[in-house]
Image: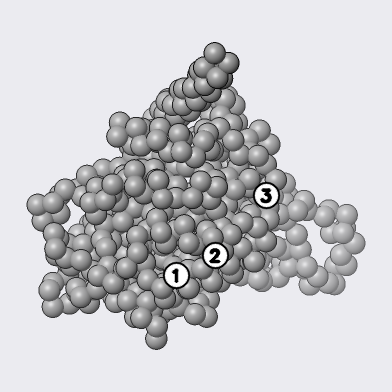
């Protein structure tokens, strides 16, 4: 290992070590400590890295930050970061496991909706990065024989999720210019089923009924059309598949198919 | 390739719509390349619209040019991501920092970590710059970062190190005047000596930004936050830089506590006023010497 590589390994060690003491600061002999101790100097870089990563989490999770307040959010992020340091310079990929961290974060356990709201925000983030889909090919769909096994495809920007909490309303209430007449009850719910998809520059959030959700989830899991219909009908035997199929193709949620 | 001239400002997502709707009078904009790695993203779609009206400069923060790790997939992947974005964006300038972020064990700290100014580090950084220029197929500019510590084994100065890098690799230099001021305060050197020892033709761009202060163990350090207006001392240092290097492309850089766009435009006007003043003084001194010569 070169001298510089060794120094950089020690630098990373100190940044990742949590509270620094004279005993655990490896950089002590490599840096000028005439005015400030090695712990003080390395602490600046430790704090700076955590602040930069926190800013990245703040961009992905603005509603969580608004819900818990900026100071609490930063404290939560610090706990998360010290156990989940980035492994790449592409910060778009960082923070996927933040929702499961929140579920276990003792000081926020009473806010039992945080995990699902965070999961929803991550899906918004993913949708914002996704590729556009091409227009649905109606002509070729007409050529599919009834004996063929048909499998529909969801657009890359589509995400679906369900929650026992009204997370769609919580998310909406924390947007700029949020509607004033949202009624919110956290006393259990029959379930919230959400479809996210991008149209142009805007990410649309749509709540759907359970049978629609099962239909889309089946498609998302790669099942063929027949299986998707069965999944939907298991929840609602009277579901109008034709109606929903047309709706989702027109919205661009379903963008293609394979035979 | 787009021409970068005059005083530009950082393009932040908070101002995307304002640039599209109002088209404020700004000669060029600078983006963090890392924010546009996905060309399908909504941010990239906004940028695609904005770049129709504004030349763009690509400022990178993660090439990790000072990293000693050989065979570092994290760094290679990052460079490839930058290449993809740059190929799409066709920016007028590309820059990154004299710093490192990626370690050999797979960690990546999104920060500008300092390097010692040793012969070994010089060889490593020079090779990394040459490699980046080979991959990107063009010159990159290297920026001086702010720093808060110095290494015991660091026999030459930052300005000597940077100047030698420019000579060895053919890279240009991006002088961040605020960073010079911040590091000069933290390490006790004269910022004018720094400026005076940078070769005239190497500098291709200047950055201006604000900083904050922090008390560490009773000593006040300046911390580079890019979240405030440019301070008076830095404006004075900028005037000296313009006198020495000429009216170089200058960026009003702002990365945290993003204010209304009007604040960035106000800072831009101040930089333009300084450039005009320096040019005016130069012109009158040329005029005076011509007149005196005739007399």
- Give the left or right position of residue A131, taking residue B278 as reference: right
- Give the left or right position of residue A34, taking residue A133 as reference: left
Q: Please tell me whether mark 1 or mark 3 is closer to you in this view.
A: 1
Q: At 57% from the left edge and 52% from the top edge, which residue is drawn? A: B94
Mark 1 is surrounded, within 10 Å at the Cα level, by few (under 14), some (14 to 19) or many (20 or more) other residues, namely some
Q: Which residue is mark 1?
A: B122
- The kind of secondary structure element at disc 3 is loop
> Residue extending furthest right?
A143
Contact flag, marks 1 and 3 (Cβ < 8 Å): no
Q: Nearer the viewer, residue B165 or B104?
A: B165
Task: Give the CA distance from mark 2 to mark 3.
Answer: 25 Å
* Mark 1 and mark 3 on one chain: yes
Q: Which residue is mark 2?
A: B168
* Mark 1 and mark 2 on one chain: yes
Task: Give the CA distance from mark 1 to mark 3.
Answer: 29 Å
* Residue B295 appearing in the image: yes
- The kind of secondary structure element at disc 1 is helix
* Chain letter for the residue marked with disc 3 in the picture: B
> Residue extending furthest bottom?
A1
Q: At 34% from the left edge and 43% from the top edge, which residue is drawn? A: B192
| Disc with the residue nearer the chain's start (1 vs 2) | 1
Q: Position of residue B285 (x, y in %)?
A: 49, 22
| Disc with the residue nearer the chain's start (1 vs 3) | 3
* Residue B59 appearing in the image: no
Q: At 83% from the left edge and 53% from the top edge, which residue is drawn? A: A138
* Chain letter for the residue marked with disc 1 in the picture: B
- Give the left or right position of residue A143, taking residue B31 as reference: right
Residue A15 numbered mark, or none: none
């Amino acid at each position: 290992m070169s001298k510089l590589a060794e120094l950089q390994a020690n630098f990373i060690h100190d940044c990742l070590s949590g509270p620094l003491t004279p005993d655990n600061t490896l950089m002590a002999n490599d840096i000028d400590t005439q005015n400030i101790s090695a712990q003080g100097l390395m602490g600046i870089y430790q704090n700076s890295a955590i602040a930069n990563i926190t800013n990245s989490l703040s961009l992905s999770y603005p509603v969580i930050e608004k819900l818990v307040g900026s100071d609490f959010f930063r404290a939560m992020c610090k706990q998360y970061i010290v156990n989940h340091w980035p492994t790449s310079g592409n910060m778009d990929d960082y923070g996927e496991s933040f929702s499961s961290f929140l579920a276990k974060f003792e000081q926020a356990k009473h806010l039992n909706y945080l995990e699902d709201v965070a999961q929803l925000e991550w899906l918004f983030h993913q949708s914002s990065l996704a590729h556009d889909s091409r227009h649905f090919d109606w002509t070729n769909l007409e050529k599919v024989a009834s004996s063929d096994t048909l499998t529909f495809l969801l657009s890359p920007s589509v995400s679906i999720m369900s929650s026992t909490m009204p997370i769609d309303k919580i998310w909406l209430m924390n947007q700029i210019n949020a509607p004033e007449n949202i009624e919110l009850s956290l006393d259990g719910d029959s379930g919230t089923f959400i479809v996210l998809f991008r149209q142009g520059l805007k990410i649309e959030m749509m709540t759907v009924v359970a049978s629609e959700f099962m239909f889309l989830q089946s498609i998302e899991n790669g099942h063929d059309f027949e299986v998707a219909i069965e999944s939907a009908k298991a929840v609602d035997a009277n579901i109008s598949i034709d109606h929903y199929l047309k709706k989702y193709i027109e919205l661009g949620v379903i963008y293609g198919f394979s035979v | 390739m787009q021409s970068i001239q005059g005083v530009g400002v950082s393009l932040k997502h908070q101002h995307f719509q304002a640039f599209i709707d109002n088209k404020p009078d700004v000669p060029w904009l600078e983006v963090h390349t890392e924010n546009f790695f996905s060309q399908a993203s909504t941010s990239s779609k906004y940028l695609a619209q904005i770049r129709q009206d504004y030349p763009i400069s690509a400022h990178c923060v993660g090439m990790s040019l000072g990293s000693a790790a050989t065979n570092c997939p994290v760094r290679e992947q990052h460079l490839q991501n930058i290449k993809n974005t740059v190929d799409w964006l066709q920016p007028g300038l590309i820059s990154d920092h004299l710093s490192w972020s990626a370690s050999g064990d797979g960690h990546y700290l999104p920060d500008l970590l300092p390097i010692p100014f040793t012969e070994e580090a010089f060889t490593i950084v020079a090779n990394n710059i040459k490699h980046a220029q080979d991959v990107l197929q063009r010159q990159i500019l290297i920026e001086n970062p702010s720093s808060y510590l110095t290494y015991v084994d660091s026999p030459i100065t930052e300005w000597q190190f940077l100047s030698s890098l420019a000579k060895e690799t053919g890279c240009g230099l991006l002088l961040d005047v605020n960073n010079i001021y911040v590091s000069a305060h933290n390490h006790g050197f004269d910022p004018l000596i720094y400026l005076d020892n940078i070769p005239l033709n190497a500098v291709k761009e200047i950055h201006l930004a604000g900083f904050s202060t922090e008390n560490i163990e009773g000593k006040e350090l300046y911390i580079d936050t890019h979240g405030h207006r440019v301070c008076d001392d830095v404006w004075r240092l900028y005037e000296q830089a313009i006198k020495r290097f000429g009216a170089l492309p200058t960026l009003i850089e702002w990365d945290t506590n993003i204010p209304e766009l009007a604040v960035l435009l106000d800072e831009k006007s101040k930089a333009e006023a300084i450039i005009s003043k320096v040019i005016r003084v130069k012109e009158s001194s040329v005029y005076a010497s011509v007149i005196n010569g005739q007399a």
